Amino acid sequence: MNDQVFLLPDLGEGLTEADILEWRVTVGDTVRIDQIIAEVETAKAAVEVPVPFEGTVIELHGAAGDTLKVGTPLVTIRGTHTAAAGPAPAAPAGHEQYREEERAGSGNVLIGYGTGFDAPRRRRRVHSADRSTAAPGVHEQADVVGPTSTTVPPSAPRVISPLVRNLALSKGIDLSALTGTGPGGIIVRADVESHADVESPPVLAAPVSGPARFHLERIPLKGLRKTVADKLSTSRREIPDATTWVDVDATELLRARAAINHGLPPEDHVSLLAVVARLTIAALSRYPELNASVDTEHGEIIRHGQVNLGVAAQTPRGLIVPVLDHADTMTTVELAHALRDTVETAREGKLPPARLTGGTFTLNNYGVFGVDGSTPIINHPEAAILGIGRIVDRPWVVDGALTVRKLTQVSLSFDHRVCDGGAAGGFLRLFADYLENPVAALGRL
């Protein structure tokens, strides 16, 4: 018998740390090679971690909510067998061997190395009395790809956020007793708060004059939220952006989408987002200066040879932008399949980090939040982002007569270094024309 220390693996994409979302094993459990022992959250995705050893778990090097550096101990297993990739020495003595294997190109990415053995950083726990009870709602827009269920073990509560777990722990609530109301049955913060209110009815206090009372809360800016914050800050700091917008009659767009789906099997039905994406790509082919980025190091504007379309998606972990590589080579039906699969996988937290990089242009459907307009922030280092609001009935003049039509607002934020207002306005007007006359536009593709 010997003890094997499994280090947090190198998760790729230059990621150096991860938060422990949940353990799938406990001390004393017997594990086999390649068994999933934990789920961790990086700055880009939730990742299931398999163990390359078999034996008995004798120590977990962190609790749910802790942040570990890549290459620091994750779990210690007492046993005699290891994966075919080779035995892993105990830390910290084996740390240098991991580094040597990586430098030599061993390919042993399951057992990663890190930047040092810093102590795990714990999330700051906030007392339950200081936590907010507000839970934002989300409005759905027809034909936009919706959330799907997240795959979790049948015996495990459907929880993604470690903050929700910590909140339940602070209130003494058993998560397995809750029914989630989030996408796919995920337990969200509001579920914990509602259960707490039922179990412990609030004590009525004397009325307080003035505005509604709020509660102090400190949320760690880390993981995906920190990555998004850093990227948006970089965009605002480096890109001289401008925004232009226009109201669009989308009545014919809805009719075209219905006509496309007529006679198609349900699995091939095209979402409204897919049609919008196809028309976006068509407009970009006429204005390629917007499918670009700026190389500040070399002082060059790079116009990309293909459209890698990013699609902003709200997930239980926050806002992410999965990318459809070579979207310009896809048909409308192929785009619909790719969008559906990509967004569903993103909402489950299962997209590999590589699928969240390399975009050349981003499409943002903020209409799902029930809003009409926005000035979206450019997804650095891209040069532009196109947004579309909700589609609603509004009065509109057609052939000199007032009537009710399906109206939406589209906006374009662009990098003024890559083009001027004439090109940006020309692209947006062309895209708006495509939305108002989609059959003619699609017929020319």
Image: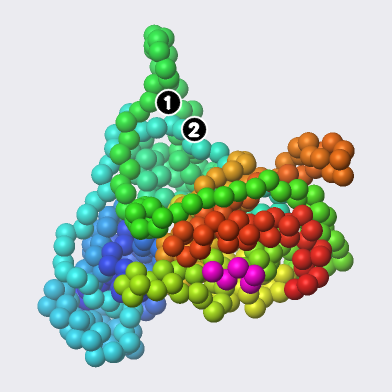
Identity, as a three-letter code, of the amino acid under mark 1? Ser
SS at mark 2?
A: helix
Residue 256 appearing in the image = yes
Q: Which mark is residue 90?
A: none
Q: Quadrant of residue 433?
A: bottom right
What residue is pinned by disc 2? 194
83, above or below 366, in the image: below
Q: Quadrant of residue 231?
A: bottom left
Would you say 301 lies left or right of 87 here?
Answer: right
Label 1 to label 2, Cα distance in Å? 10 Å
Picture quarter with the C terminus: bottom right
Q: Please report the bounds of the magenta region as a residue range.
A: 285-289
Residue at 22% in and 54% down: 121
Would you say 347 lies left or right of 220 here?
Answer: right
Magenta stretch, overall SS: helix
What residue is pinned by disc 1? 200
Residue at 20% in and 81% down: 99
- x and y percentages locating residue 120 in the rendered image: 21, 58
Mark 1 or mark 2: name the one nearer the start of the chain.
2
Residue lying at the far left of the rendered structure: 93
- x and y percentages locating residue 84 in the rendered image: 34, 89
Closest to the observer, 198 or 233: 233
